[in-house]
Image (spheres, grey):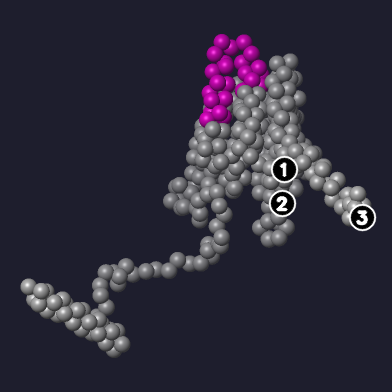
Amino acid sequence: MTPRDRKPGRWRRLRRERHRPNLRRGVIILPSAFTLGNLFFGLYAMVAASRGDFTWAAWCIVIAWILDYLDGRVARVTRTGSAFGAELDSLTDAISFGVAPALILIFLYFPEADWGWVIGFAYVSAAVIRLARFNVEQGGEARSHFHGLPSPAAGVLLATHYPFTTTAFFQQYLAALPWPQIMVITTVLVSILMISHIPYAKMPPLDFKTRRGIVRTTLLVGCFVLAVTIPYYWFFPAIVGYALWGLVRSVFLGLMQRLPERDPLLDEEPEDDDSDVEPREVDYHELTHEPETLDAATRSSSADDTDQRDTRDTDIIQWKERRS
């Protein structure tokens, strides 16, 4: 062993290089672990619904939603996103936010109906179509908006309806309504919104650099506090408001014949924001006519070009006459 090999710095570097592949492998597995956790709670939600525990089934769907949000964040932070992870996430979402909410709805309102499963089939079909379209059109990741209502939001909307029905406000003011019929209509509308072309805003990241970012961050923190303190009252009305806001906003913009400032489904963010710059009016009639007058320099240049073309033409004619 040479004196150079006895240096402690060299041994430390060798030990780091020896353990680095294991660390890299662990970082790659981390997003998939969140995705499989999403699958675990989605499956257990179906088990809880089959046992009649609809409250715990609803909270399992909410936990699956949180894990689905975290796996994408972890993949982007660790830069370990892959096509495999995107496909695994879509398959998991089809179960946790497609099949599981449909079974909760069937077990809750149509346990003995012969054709009650049809409404669940329609919802699952819409969720699967929405996920497949999301992978094709947006590459498994939405930058600013979703194309149609996201399947996690749709699943949480249907699942958290039951915890909301156990609140004192619902029992006092809303319990007399025909909720089986209302939930059938709600499921159909949610299915249509998932496969619609309505853009839905993505949850923005935390931002303390700009005034708009501070406002959004404050709203997110407020929503988080409400979700933790009064989950029975918050989740179902909040997701219903999110679904209706996208629909009403699109209808309003359509009636006003207003276009968005940029394509909300565009993958790349614009380099600069020109929304504050007023458009300049251009008289296109001026572009179809030649200017009436030219300055002296332009006229001189044009005359020189004409003389050169005439000289070249004369030389070519004389050369052809001599050859003939």
Callout in the foreground (3, 1): 3
At horizontal 59% and vertical 39% (from top left) the residue drawn is 140
Residue 43's spot in the image, x, y percent?
70, 23
Outermost residue, bottom side: 296
Which image quadrant for residue 287? Answer: bottom left
Of badges 2 and 3, the one in the foreground is: 3
| Residue 133 in picture, x, y percent from top left | 52, 35
Q: Is residue 269 magenta?
A: no
Query: Which of disc 1 and disc 3 is earlier in sequence?
Result: 3
Q: Was residue 106 drawn as part of the magenta stretch in this picture?
A: yes
How crowded pointer 3 is (Cα within 10 Å; few <14, some 14-19, many 20+) is rated as few
Mark 2 Cα shell of 10 Å, populated few (<14), some (14-19), many (≥20): some
Q: Is residue 321 left or right of residue 40?
A: left
Mark 3: amino acid: Pro
Residue for point 73% across, 26% down:
40
Q: Earlier in the sequence, mark 1 or mark 2?
A: 1
- Mark 3 vs mark 1, CA separation in Å: 43 Å
Q: Nearer the viewer, residue 156 or 2?
A: 2
Would you identify the image quadrant in which residue 173 lies? Answer: top right
Image height of 268 relative to 107, above or below? below
Could you tell me if the residues under marks 1 and 2 are in contact, i.e. CB atoms within 8 Å?
no
- Farthest-out residue, front: 1
- Residues 102 and 228: in front is 102
The secondary structure type at the circle numbered 2 is loop
Q: Which residues are magenta?
A: 102-129
Which residue position holds label 1? Answer: 74
Q: Which residue is mark 2?
A: 206
- Eyeballing the image, is 19 above or below 103? below
Residue 132 has which mark? none
